[in-house]
Image (tube, rainbow, N blue to C red):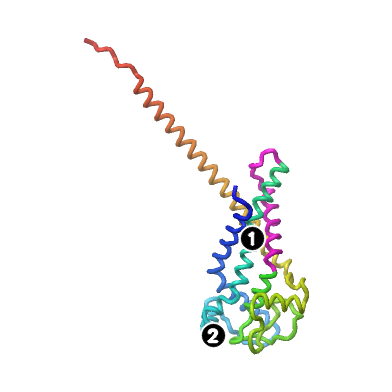
Amino acid sequence: MSSIPGVFAAGGVAGCGAVMASHPFETVKVRMQLQGELQKTSSNSRIYNGPLHGLKVIIRNEGIRGVYSVFGAGSAYQLLLNGSRIGFYEPIRSNLTSFLYTDANKQSFGISVFSGPLSGVIGAMLGSPFFLVKTRMQTYSKVAPMGTQHVYTNTIMARIYNQNGALYRGILDCLAKTISTEGLLACYKGFLPHLARILPHTVLTLTIAEQAISVVKTLQRKEIDTHESIEGVDKSSKFTETERPNPEPIF
């Protein structure tokens, strides 16, 4: 069995690799969500008409760096979230199985369903501050601003950035400003909705993956057993042919 740090690292690296492709669309998604909220309460013009149009507008105005805004925070979030979900899932599942059953290798659907959310909660708790930083910094655009930044009293998606210059100098600056003006708990604003999104995804992904791996292993064992049986029959036939005595000549 792989070590927990090894599995944690593998899950984190996999998440960081995936975010390379998904981060530009995540940036567009966040800005389109903010745009939709603003249009409900004010007469702000529509800047992004869809995902592809949003990519085009951001790249035209802000360059490639615009769509990869706060890539570091996105990577840190994925590293902690997926590293924890994958890294802690198997230890939780195997320990619960050993505690409840005599056979530590037993596959229990119920234990898998319980272990998934637990590892998901750990991942969400560790990654949530970076998710907040990522979202705040992704919404900011001094080229195509939406609304007006007032005070730090609203939730993330209602915060509007259009002041002159950069609001945050970087990930740590954003984190420091958030904590200094709103307190440590501000890093976990929207944590419950975040969990509501993460937990079903974690349960389904890990449980289905485990059941699928179990089915594949069963099929592989059957294939190996069948292959060994055929080889055994072939060897037996060859042995019989070799050991059979020569018939006596008729004449």
Q: Which of 209 and 45 is in front in this view?
A: 209
Q: How far apart are marks 2 and 1 (CA)?
A: 34 Å
Three-letter amino acid code of the residue under disc 1 = His
Three-letter amino acid code of the residue under disc 2 = Asn
Determine whether, in the image, residue 22 is placed left or right of residue 116: left
Name which residue lies at 72% across and 42% down. Answer: 100
Secondary structure of the residue carrying numbered label 2? helix
Name which residue lies at 54% across and 69% down. Answer: 20
Q: Quadrant of residue 22?
A: bottom right
Q: In which quarter of the image is the C terminus?
A: top left
Mark 2: few/some/many CA within 10 Å (<14, 14-19, 20+): few
Q: In this view, does 144 lie above or below 226?
A: below
Q: Is residue 117 magenta?
A: yes
The stretch in magenta equals 101-128
Q: Quadrant of residue 168?
A: bottom right
Q: Is residue 104 magenta?
A: yes
- Name the spot of residue 24 as percent of width and height, x first: 55, 74
Q: Which residue is identified by label 2? A: 61
Secondary structure of the residue carrying numbered label 1? helix
The label number, if any, that marks residue 201 in the structure image: 1
